[in-house]
Image: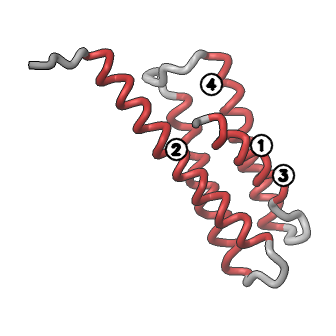
Amino acid sequence: MQRIQYGDLLEDDQQVARERERVALDQSIQLLERAATSGAPLASAAEAIAFTSKLWTLLIEDLASPDNGLPKELKAQLVSIGIWILRELEAARTDASKGFADVIVVSKAIRDGLT
């Protein structure tokens, strides 16, 4: 009979959580890219902004939690990135010419760091 160690369960849980975060970031990136295409309907930008804002709000809340096991410096850096993304999304919401290019680049870098 195989015994599963508690540490192994925690590692598996963290891997599952990272995969969920990667999938959510993929969805966000797809929505942003679709909204950034020429001639995209205004509703696609609203959907991309709403989804990405909600995602980063949840990520920031998780990073701020004392239960989050990431190193403090990394958590602080990710929170700063999240706040920047939320500001960029708000700027794009109020000024359609702002676009999503920078948010897409940063989101892809974060996503790629999860794999």
Q: Secondary structure at mark 2?
A: helix
Q: CA distance from mark 3 to mark 2?
A: 20 Å
* Residue 49 quadrant: bottom right
| Residue 75 badge | 4
The disc at residue 84 is 1
Q: Earlier in the sequence, mark 3 or mark 1?
A: 1
The percent position of residue 76, horizontal first and vertical second, equals: 67, 24
Precedes in sequence: disc 3 or disc 2:
2
Residue beneath disc 2: 21
Q: Disc 2 to disc 4, how far (Cα)?
A: 15 Å
Q: Quick one: SS at disc 4?
A: helix
User: Which amino acid, mark 1?
Assistant: Trp
Label 2 vs label 1, nearer the camera: 2
Q: Residue furthest right?
A: 97
- What quarter of the picture does the N terminus occupy? top left
Query: Do tag 3 and tag 4 residues touch (Cβ < 8 Å)?
Result: no
Mark 2 and mark 4 lie on one chain; the one further toward the N terminus is 2
Secondary structure at numbered mark 1: helix
Q: Residue at x 67, y 32 (%)?
A: 78
Q: Is the residue marked by circle 1 packed among few (<14), some (14-19), or many (20+) residues within 10 Å?
A: few
Residue ID for mark 3: 102
Q: Nearer the viewer, mark 2 or mark 4?
A: 2
